[in-house]
Image (cartoon, rainbow, N blue to C red):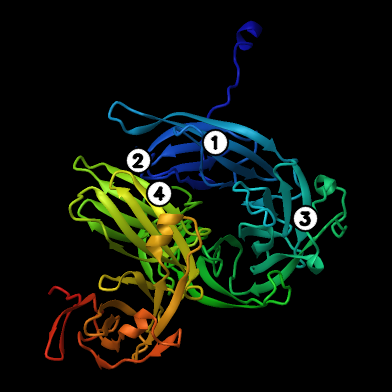
Amino acid sequence: MAGRSSEWRLQRGQYLGEISALCFLHPPPSVSCLPYLLAGTGSQLLLYDLVTGVMIRSFQVFEGIRVHGISLEKFHQQSSSSALAVKIAVFGERKVKMFCLRVEIVNNSQNKPQVSMVDLILLLSLPKLNHWVLDVRFLKDSVSSSHEESQYLAIGCSDNSVCFWNILRSDFIFEVRCSEKCLLYSMRMWGDEVEALRVASGTIYNEVIVWKVVRQNHAPFVESAVKHLMNPTSEEGEDLPGQQYEALHICKMLGHEGSIFRIAWSSNGSKLASVSDDRSARIWAVHAERSGAKNSVGDDVSYSMGPVLFGHSARVWDCCIFDSLIITAGEDCTCRLWQLDGTQLRMIKDHIGRGIWRCFKSEYVRCLHFTREDTLYVATNNGHLYHAKLSTAGDVKWTKLVRVSGEVPIVCMNLISTNSSDDCHGIDDWVAVGDGKGSMTIVRVVGNVWTPKVGLVFTWSAEIGRQLLGTYWCRSLGFSFIFSADPKGKLKLWRLCDPLQTASDNNTGSHNATLVAEFVSCFGVRIVCLDASLKEEVLVCGDLRGNLILFPLLKGLLLGSYIASEAKISPSNHFKGAHGISSVCSVAIAGSSFSQVEIHSVWPRSSK
């Protein structure tokens, strides 16, 4: 019996339980039209192909510790075009590990890319911290901006503190503790640099505390290793050696009546979403009037509470926030989509069991524009601009062109094409995109439809943040002039200084955009379409409420004959409610005769 019993052994099997962490990996479009999905369950990390829905591989990342969160850098293309790599930080309880995920891509028999090998390489295992880790974020060095890769890890802990780890030196450099010392249920950080870092903390007192990291008395940043962060006997109030940063309290948000399980920042850091076991989700707006100094501690900051989202029949575990959409997931096994005004758009109920623990959002399309029936440009909420070529076989050839600074959403796009009709495959497109920070970017795309190349890129500030909602070329004016539109019916006309000559000299040279004139509508409603005639010296615009507005557009203004560099121009005529209250979709100057101008306009008409 003894010999027979010795043959019995316990073998560890795969963890069968809830998904506790989700994260998307965004490869180049040439590799996959959909992102890969990383999921944490138990002590494992699972990698899924969303095109096929198949799990590619699983990795054991912890021993006896559940994965609570995943944070990653963007994909870095390796020297070999078939290899992709990304740094991943995985955390659970009081442990943080950093890995390099390598994905080898090969073409199959149909000449389509597919994953041939996936490897997860451990780069470092941080010492165990004193408190549970609630969030981890990769940060760049604000002093040395030439580094593309992150230099630090910001580690948010449950005692309302953030520890900073130097990736290159492999040690802790300093810790910042919020003045509100309390235990947390949740934390989420926003920002890509130490001095831009904002922290939102969900406390055990049902509050959301927002604070940021600032320099102490504007001291220069000098790293100093902090060895006692992992020492459980260190005193709570002990000063850290070489500490150059401190926590600046921004605001405390009150309203929830239960524990705050999850917090999410909007892409530009102006809004927060929080969910609680009071079965609600709440939207908060953080208002900050920044002073001239970049790191001034005297910023006047306030907040306002938006709508309260009620609909879940049990606790709400997670949330995501887009520019115009909120997603919540709860214990009632439903995932719900909401508008920012609190209107529930949809309820998805496919899961069964004890609830949905995690939800996550991916990159999505903000704007698209066809140049011909099989070619289009696509702009996303992460600031990417793509060129897409459709084939008769149903395949899509994606080319990533540019990305505007940071993860800023592109909110508007327009293009004008100057390629010759004799060359059916050649392209010479001028693409204008406006982003959420109010910056306008001009991209000239040349080459052919299969291998487009960027011939010119330059950017300037056209509006303040979140005020640039439209950008418009006008074919009669060519690519030397472009319009920008704000929400209140104001158009700005910009002159692009010698774009062709500059592009032929150097595509990274200095480019200028000069403000020529401002056209202000008498209706105060956002302008959504326009056309101009140099012959008749007129600009006609259509707005969101069905109005048509005419402005004088003198040739001397375009040629720079006037002394005033920025003219303020009022309407010469208008047609109120030309299309009722429906938005004007397009407007065109069709012709003129005997001091009359013929205008054609189009508006959406609902079908009965």
Amino acid type at circle 2 is Val
Label 2's element? loop
Label 1's element? strand
Which tag, 2 or 4, sits closer to the chain's start? 2
The location of residue 585, given as percent across then percent down, is 24, 75
Q: Which residue does the image show at 67% across and 45% down from the upper left?
A: 93
Amino acid type at circle 4 is Lys
- Left or right relative to 189: residue 568: left
| Cα distance in 3D space between marks 4 and 3 | 39 Å
**Residue at the disc numbered 2:** 51
Which tag, 2 or 3, sits closer to the chain's start? 2
- Left or right relative to 518: residue 301: right
Label 3's element? strand
Which tag, 1 or 3, sits closer to the chain's start? 1
Labels 1 and 3 touching (C-beta < 8 A): no
The location of residue 398, given as percent across then percent down, is 34, 46
| Cα distance in 3D space between marks 4 and 1 | 22 Å
Label at residue 175? 3
Amino acid type at circle 1 is Leu
Q: Quadrant of the N terminus?
A: top right
